[in-house]
Amino acid sequence: MKRNDNTLTKVEFEVMNILWDIEGSACAWDILEHLDEPRPAYTTIATYLKVLYEKGYLDFHKVDGQGKTHRYVPLVTRAEYTRRTMQEVKRNFFGGSTGHMLRYFVKEENLSPEDIKELLELIHN
């Protein structure tokens, strides 16, 4: 049963980043190899993969000759997730206004002159 929860936890996002970077299917062992020490237990990663599957972020398949091993593939690209997340941030924190969101970043972030120049060029184009 798929959950209807689009939010990723910090660890779920880390697992998705690994899968996006691999650009193919991966099993829990592959993901563990990409994590920094101290690594979580295999069963912990397997649980995160199950949750990501239930949330609709992953699909899986079995490979003949690999026993019970599941190979997971992302169903959502990094760009799609980023777009969804930024739309949610814009809606929840800025009343859906792109202008308010941009003003916030211009005021609150220490933008370099190069950043400002790049933003102005994007706006003019």
Image (cartoon, rainbow, N blue to C red):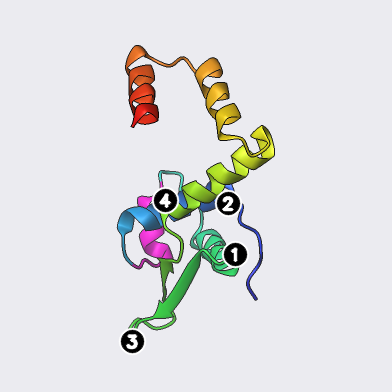
* Numbered circle sitting on residue 55: 1
Looking at the image, residue 39 lies above or below residue 51: above
Looking at the image, residue 14 lies above or below residue 22: above
SS at mark 2? loop
> Cα distance, mark 4 to mark 1?
17 Å
Q: Residue at x 40, y 28 (%)?
A: 123
| Residue labelled with disc 4 | 79
Q: Residues within 10 Å of mark 4 (few under 14, many from 20)?
A: few
Q: Residue at x 58, y 51 (%)?
A: 8
SS at mark 4? helix
Q: Is residue 125 something that shows in the picture?
A: yes
50 sits to left or right of 69: right
Amino acid type, mark 1: Lys
Looking at the image, residue 66 lies above or below residue 71: below
* Numbered circle sitting on residue 8: 2
> Cα distance, mark 2 to mark 3?
31 Å
> Cα distance, mark 4 to mark 3?
32 Å
Q: What stretch of residues is rendered in magenta?
A: 25-35
Tell me which numbered mark, 2 or 4, is placed earlier along the sequence.
Answer: 2
Q: Residue 115 in the image: x percent, y percent?
A: 36, 20
